Amino acid sequence: MLVRLTMICNGATAATRRGSFPLDEPLEPRSLTLAKAMRGMLRRADRVWTGPALRARQTADALALDGSVDPLLADQDHGSWAGKGFDDVQAQQPEGIAAWLTDPHAAPHGGESLADVAHRSSDFMDRLVAERGHTIALTHASVIRTAILHVLGAPLAASRKIDIEPLSVTDFRSDGRRWVLRACGVTFPKSAKPLRP
């Protein structure tokens, strides 16, 4: 394999711990500490990209990775639901939540649908498929889930069956023509050794 893509999910925030739809909030202190403990566990990268959200950029900084912002790595735009708790939205808009959970093309909140996120993550991966070397992308669970589905050729409805933890690592490889999923959801204990190619 000539091409390697390592996607790292941003650390947790107070909003995600509460079960709220994300805003552009900072990482919680514990996530900053955990990310700093991961320094040196990743292989050298030829390039680093990060989503534009504060939590993605802070994750990159905590990992001591100097990344350039790529809008394709942005988290799903949850529109009018951003900052609100899932339970509150479900109580106020049960039909909207039901559509959002079952239809990947639905965007009852006025933001992006899952299909929109999938289109962006596919564009990102298609751009990198022939990019020699190792790319690290600091992004969000929704982008990583849809990247996995893109590589596997799986339907978007399967997204709800993929759990991406904060600060987990998902690794892809390419021969310059197609991607393969090499590892998914890897997390590092403090005593972990660096990832090898």
Image (spheres, rainbow, N blue to C red):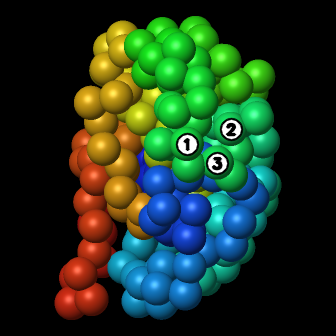
Residues marked 3 and 1 touching at CB (< 8 Å): yes
Helix, strand or loop under label 1: helix
Amino acid carrying mark 1 in the image: Asp
Q: Which residue is mark 1?
A: 88
Helix, strand or loop under label 2: helix
Q: Earlier in the sequence, mark 2 or mark 1?
A: 2
Q: Nearer the viewer, residue 91 or 57?
A: 91
Q: CA distance from mark 2 to mark 1?
A: 10 Å
In the displayed structure, 105 sits above or below 33; it is above
Task: Kindly indicate the quadrant of the structure image that contains residue 38.
Answer: bottom left
Q: Quadrant of the N terminus?
A: top left
Please name the residue shown 60% across and 74% down the image: 27
Query: Callout 1: 10 Å neighbours few (<14), some, many (20+)?
Result: few
Q: CA distance from mark 3 to mark 2?
A: 5 Å
Q: Which residue is mark 3?
A: 84
Q: Quadrant of the C terminus?
A: bottom left
